């Protein structure tokens, strides 16, 4: 399934290998908008590796995370082999969660660490890093999820439309320009990664 998505006209797969910390955004483009921009920006600022898949505007195909298989992409396989820890950036929309940021994934220590930095950067958002308070659909703990395939596992970051600069809250905002909320999110992610022990670079 994932290989078919990558082979669809207009779908762009991108990877840059830097440090052993990585960012993922494999539902980018028209599907979970702005996730690839957030992953790329945060990775560039803290010297992290990054892997993204961007779908064109006329196309939306949601391949479940558990079907995003490194055996179907040499670039994803190389990325997973290179990094030790990862943050996977996703978008979601759910009633009652318009100002929520959810931190799932199997690396709960990292989720708590990232959560503390995001609370400082975005005090008006509800940063949820208690797995029991995250809806099961967004917990990202399945072993086949790419966020959990790397050596030290990772954090699945679920972002509501508002934090990604989407929805009625941002009507009138200049298209293509990041909102202050998105910039604050990126700042928080960068500070979280930079405050970890220096990642190894080969």
Image: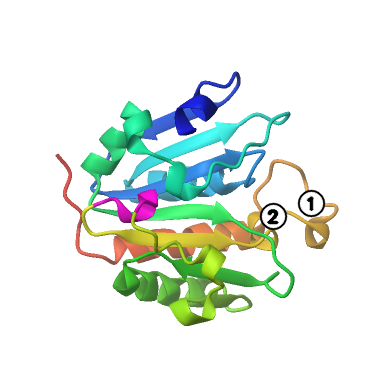
Residue 9 x/y as whole percent: 60, 18
Please tell me whether residue 142 is drawn above or below residue 41 in the rendered image. below
Q: Is residue 69 left or right of residue 32?
A: left
Quadrant of residue 170 within the rendered picture: bottom right
Q: Secondary structure at mark 2?
A: loop
Mark 2–mark 1 Cα distance, whole angstroms, equals: 9 Å
Image point (45%, 43%), residue name:
67
Q: Secondary structure at mark 1?
A: loop
Front residue of this view, candidates 46 and 29: 29
Image point (35%, 73%), residue name:
113
Q: Is residue 70 left or right of residue 83?
A: right
Q: Which mark is residue 165?
A: 2
Q: Which residues are magenta?
A: 144-150
Front residue of this view, candidates 67 and 118: 67
Please tell me whether residue 148 is drawn above or below residue 3 in the rendered image. below
Check disc 1 and report the residue beneath it. 173
Residue reaching furthest to the top:
9
């Amino acid at each position: 399934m994932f290989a078919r998505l990558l082979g669809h006209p207009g779908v762009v797969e991108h990877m840059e290998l830097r440090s052993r910390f990585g960012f993922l955004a494999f539902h980018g483009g028209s599907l979970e908008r702005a996730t690839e921009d957030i992953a790329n920006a945060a990775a560039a600022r803290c010297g992290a590796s990054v892997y993204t898949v961007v779908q064109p505007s006329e196309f939306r195909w949601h391949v479940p995370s558990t079907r995003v298989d490194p055996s179907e992409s040499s670039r994803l396989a190389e990325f997973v082999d290179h990094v030790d820890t990862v943050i996977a950036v996703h978008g979601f929309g759910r009633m009652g969660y318009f100002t929520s940021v959810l931190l799932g994934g199997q690396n709960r220590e990292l989720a708590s660490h990232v959560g503390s930095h995001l609370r400082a950067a975005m005090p008006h958002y509800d940063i949820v890093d208690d797995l029991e308070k995250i809806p099961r659909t967004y917990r990202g703990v399945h072993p086949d999820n790419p966020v959990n395939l790397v050596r030290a596992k990772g954090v699945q970051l679920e972002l509501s439309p508002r934090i990604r600069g989407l929805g009625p809250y941002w009507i009138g905002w200049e298209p293509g320009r990041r909102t202050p909320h998105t910039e604050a999110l990126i700042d928080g992610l960068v500070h979280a990664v930079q405050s970890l022990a220096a990642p190894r670079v080969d």
